[in-house]
Image (cartoon, helix red, strand yellow):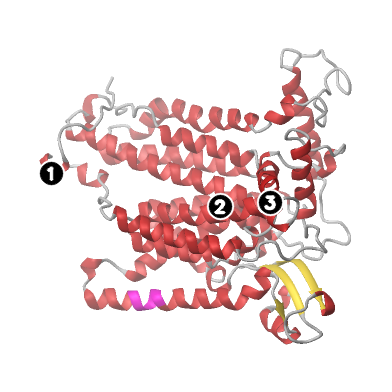
């Protein structure tokens, strides 16, 4: 049985010249550590300023707007009740507690106002900017492309608006993106460990290849995905997709290293560790997010066993608290399943086929006349509309088509990874098309669109080896595109943040009939 040992056989300069599979396992080194962190922190600061600017406005006469009306009061209840809601009906408590507890942290610091119920969301959106810069830099081995991804996420209207409203989706996006980043680091470490085995001439000792040792980054990803599920149940789609993706990466790594039976080796060596890291850890983490519910005497359905349901039966060996949570969750699931489109649907409801290009945005807030002063007239308009920046979102279909081609024909694992994240957040919604759905469900998908667009821009930019003329042309095209994206975001700024504008300006912001 071969076990990976730490790479301690001297510095890279002392290694023999790479031969055989070794060049396929060693990624180019990242040497600009200081510069990369300067870029990362600068963009994170800009992202934070954009997210936090005038965060307390708008409100509905001092109260939350849109679905903040559910989560902000429930978070405030959690501050009074030790982390649980005191609403007596599960119909209005339809998501796990973690996201609302994060909102409660902001309310504990700032109080029950717009700043309080939005602060945690704004900080989470800012963290997403930091994460995507580091993730794309590691995927592409380019600080420039990492910075481009950070700029695109900053100017994405979906990420901007959801970072400035007290809802749950931006927390889901943060946990999912962080888990994705952990798996990117884990993949790189797997390749480094296999390179060590190849360098030491031990790769052929077993047809299955070596065991890969403890993989802490994958355990971290499992914990983060458990937190994602503890925010919204749709996190389970990412959990399933990322588990498959990680297993496929393991098999591809073994094949690149020259393992005789890479897929069988993955089943024999990696399936068990994957089950621990991306099944057991997420489940335990998810249960841990219910800590306040387990510790409460008055939480909804906490003591349902022996009251609404019997204490005996074939599952009597399961602790009553877990059975109560299962019962409560089943009631919530029934609520979601029955939340179908009625005869008169919500005016801003949309279906998933319209989401990739943001054809049907959402109007969160609207005031006109005396309720929206500031434009210098008596008929001003103030709105908050969830719109994906067209310069980014209207490229979705060609970008996804190119990503699919590159993932299949290359194959390029980076495009495949971006597609996996995108598909996990979008495709599952087609399974129950009659359910009420909204464009804000694409919030955790937005970073993966940014990643895919950045990969395409990287190909347009070209490599240094392509020569100065080719590189210069690519840089010009990429710069023009980034300028257009930033300008598009600036144009949309008033309706993303509730600024007061004239009715003519408001009409000019609505580019498509479906935006009205």
The disc, 2 or 3, on the residue closer to the chain's N-terminal end is 3
Q: Is residue 392 above or below residue 310?
A: below
Q: Is residue 298 above or below residue 442?
A: above
Whether residues under marks 2 and 3 lie with C-beta atoms below 8 angstroms apart, the answer is no
The kind of secondary structure the magenta stretch mainly shows is helix
The disc placed on residue 110 is: 3
Whether residues under marks 3 and 1 lie with C-beta atoms below 8 angstroms apart, the answer is no
Q: Which residue is mark 2?
A: 423
Q: Is residue 291 left or right of 460 when viewed as pictured? A: right
| Residue 277 seen in the figure | yes
Distance between the alpha carbons at the discs numbered 2 and 3: 37 Å
| Residue 402 seen in the figure | no
Q: Quadrant of the C terminus?
A: bottom right
Magenta span covers which residues?
Answer: 475-479
User: Badge 3: how crowded within 10 Å, few (<14), some, or many (20+)?
Assistant: some
The disc, 1 or 2, on the residue closer to the chain's N-terminal end is 1
**Which is more foreground, mark 3 or mark 1?**
3
Q: Position of residue 157 (x, y in %)?
A: 60, 67
What residue appears at the point 65 percent right and 68 percent down from the top-left corner?
387
Dot 2 falls on a residue whose secondary structure is helix
Q: Is residue 241 above or below residue 495?
A: above
Q: Position of residue 318 (x, y in %)?
A: 71, 16
User: Badge 1: how crowded within 10 Å, few (<14), some, or many (20+)?
Assistant: few
So how many labels did they put on this image?
A: 3
**Which is more foreground, mark 1 or mark 2?**
1
Distance between the alpha carbons at the discs numbered 1 and 2: 41 Å
Distance between the alpha carbons at the discs numbered 3 and 1: 54 Å
Task: Determine which quarter of the picture holds residue 48.
Answer: bottom right
Q: Position of residue 243 (x, y in %)?
A: 50, 38
């Amino acid at each position: 049985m071969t076990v990976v040992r730490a790479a301690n056989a001297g510095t890279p300069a002392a290694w023999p010249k790479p031969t055989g599979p070794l060049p396929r396992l060693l990624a180019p080194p990242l040497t600009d550590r200081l510069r990369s962190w300067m870029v990362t922190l600068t963009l994170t600061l800009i992202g934070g300023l954009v997210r936090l600017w005038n965060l307390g406005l708008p409100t509905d006469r001092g109260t939350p707007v849109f679905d903040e009306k559910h989560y902000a009061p429930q978070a405030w209840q959690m501050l009074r009740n030790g982390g649980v809601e005191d609403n007596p009906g599960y119909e209005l408590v339809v998501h796990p507690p973690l996201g609302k507890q994060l909102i409660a942290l902001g309310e504990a610091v700032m109080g029950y106002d717009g700043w309080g119920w939005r602060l945690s969301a704004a900080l989470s959106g800012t963290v997403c900017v930091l994460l995507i810069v580091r993730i794309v830099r590691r995927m592409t081995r380019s600080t420039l492309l990492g910075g481009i991804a950070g700029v695109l996420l900053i100017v994405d209207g979906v990420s901007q608006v959801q970072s400035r409203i007290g809802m749950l989706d931006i927390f889901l996006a943060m946990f999912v993106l962080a888990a994705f980043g952990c798996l990117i680091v884990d993949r790189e470490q797997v390749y480094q460990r296999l390179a060590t085995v190849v360098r030491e001439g031990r790769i052929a000792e077993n047809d299955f290849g070596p065991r890969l040792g403890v993989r802490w980054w994958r355990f971290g990803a499992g914990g983060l995905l458990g937190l994602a599920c503890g925010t919204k149940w749709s996190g389970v789609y990412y959990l399933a997709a990322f588990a498959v993706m990680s297993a496929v990466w393991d098999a591809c790594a073994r094949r690149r290293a020259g393992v005789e039976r890479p897929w069988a080796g993955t089943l024999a060596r990696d399936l068990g560790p994957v089950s621990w890291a991306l099944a057991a850890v997420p489940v335990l983490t998810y249960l841990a997010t219910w800590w306040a519910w387990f510790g409460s005497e008055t939480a909804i359905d906490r003591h349902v066993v022996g009251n609404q349901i019997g204490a005996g039966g074939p599952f009597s060996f399961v602790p009553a608290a877990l059975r109560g949570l299962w019962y409560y969750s089943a009631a919530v699931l029934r609520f979601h399943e029955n939340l179908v489109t009625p005869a008169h649907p919500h005016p801003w409801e949309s279906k998933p086929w319209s989401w990739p290009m943001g054809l049907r945005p959402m109007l969160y807030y609207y005031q006109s006349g005396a309720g929206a002063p500031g434009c210098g007239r008596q008929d001003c308009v103030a709105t908050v509309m969830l719109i994906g920046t067209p310069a980014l979102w209207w490229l979705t279909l060609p970008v996804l088509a190119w990503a699919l081609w590159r993932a299949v024909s290359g194959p390029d694992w980076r495009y495949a990874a971006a597609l996996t994240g995108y598909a996990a957040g979008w495709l599952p919604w087609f399974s129950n098309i009659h359910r009420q759905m909204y464009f804000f469900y694409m919030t955790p998908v937005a970073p993966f669109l940014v990643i895919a667009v950045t990969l395409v821009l990287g190909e347009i930019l070209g490599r240094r080896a392509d020569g100065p003329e080719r590189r210069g042309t690519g840089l010009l095209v990429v710069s023009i595109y980034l300028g257009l994206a930033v300008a598009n975001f600036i144009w949309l700024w008033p309706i993303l943040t509730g600024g007061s504008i004239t009715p003519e300006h408001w009409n000019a912001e609505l580019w498509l009939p479906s935006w009205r």
